[in-house]
Amino acid sequence: MARTSRKLMQTGYVVRLARASDIAFLPAVEIKAGALFADAGLQDVADNPPADIDYIESFRRAGAVHVAVSDRGEPVGFALSGLLDGAGHLYELSVDPAHGRRGLGSRLVAAGCAYAHVNGARAMTLSTFRDLAWNGPFYRRLGFRELSASEWTPGLHVLHAREIDIKLPVDRRCFMRKEL
């Protein structure tokens, strides 16, 4: 019975391109997802403010924001994708933990990869914590591999510098890549 209930709950979600009306919901999703970092001893990361609405809207205008929407029509997860140095790049993935463990993150990553492929990219990159279960190991299960610094593109070097600027613990972070 529990297996059937879980499957029914999974079917209650749709992953689609974000609409302008979805954008206002995304900071709350990001804050809820960010709370997981506090539980992992990364309070500074959890305390970071959510992405600016204008920043998110710029991705939406490019057709690069995918949302996971509950059966009540409210976004409960999102992915911001774009193009960087000829590859797709996943800039952010956030899922409200109350809706986690239902495959939404995987579906959002797949939507971002599809966006990249349709736009001519043959690979997808991202930056993540290598050791947190819902980061590095999650992306490895989806076919991503960690890049050595010698494989970084100019854009990844810029993103690395930005992570240093915002005081992320870069010794725990990595860039990953998946061929599309």
Image (spheres, rainbow, N blue to C red):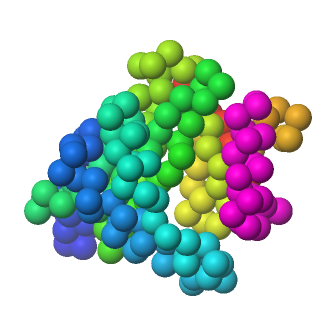
Asked if one can make out residue 136 in the rendered structure from this viewpoint, the answer is: no
The structure residue drawn at horizontal position 61% and vertical position 73%, both measured from the top left corner, is 45
- Horizontally, residue 120 falls left or right of residue 70, namely right
The structure residue drawn at horizontal position 26% and vertical position 62%, both measured from the top left corner, is 25
Q: Quadrant of the C terminus?
A: top right
Residue 28 percent location from the top left of the image:
34, 69
**Residue situated in front as seen by the camera: 171 or 138:** 171
- Residue 168 shown in magenta: yes
Residue 1: which quarter of the image?
A: bottom left
Residue 50: which quarter of the image?
A: bottom left
Please say if 99 is above or below 104: below
Residue 160 percent location from the top left of the image:
75, 49
Please say if 52 is above or below 133: above
Total of numbered circles in the picture?
0
Q: What is the residue that sits farthest to the left in this orientation?
A: 72
Residue 68 percent location from the top left of the image:
28, 52
**Residue situated in front as seen by the camera: 87 or 110:** 87
Q: Main secondary structure of the magenta part?
A: helix
- Horizontally, residue 133 falls left or right of residue 154, namely left
Q: Which segment did they paint magenta?
A: 153-173
Q: What is the residue that sits farthest to the front in this orientation?
A: 54
Asked if one can make out residue 19 in the rendered structure from this viewpoint, the answer is: yes
The structure residue drawn at horizontal position 21% and vertical position 43%, both measured from the top left corner, is 19
Residue 170 percent location from the top left of the image:
78, 61
The structure residue drawn at horizontal position 13% and vertical position 57%, both measured from the top left corner, is 73
Please say if 60 is above or below 135: above
Q: What is the residue that sits farthest to the right in this orientation?
A: 150
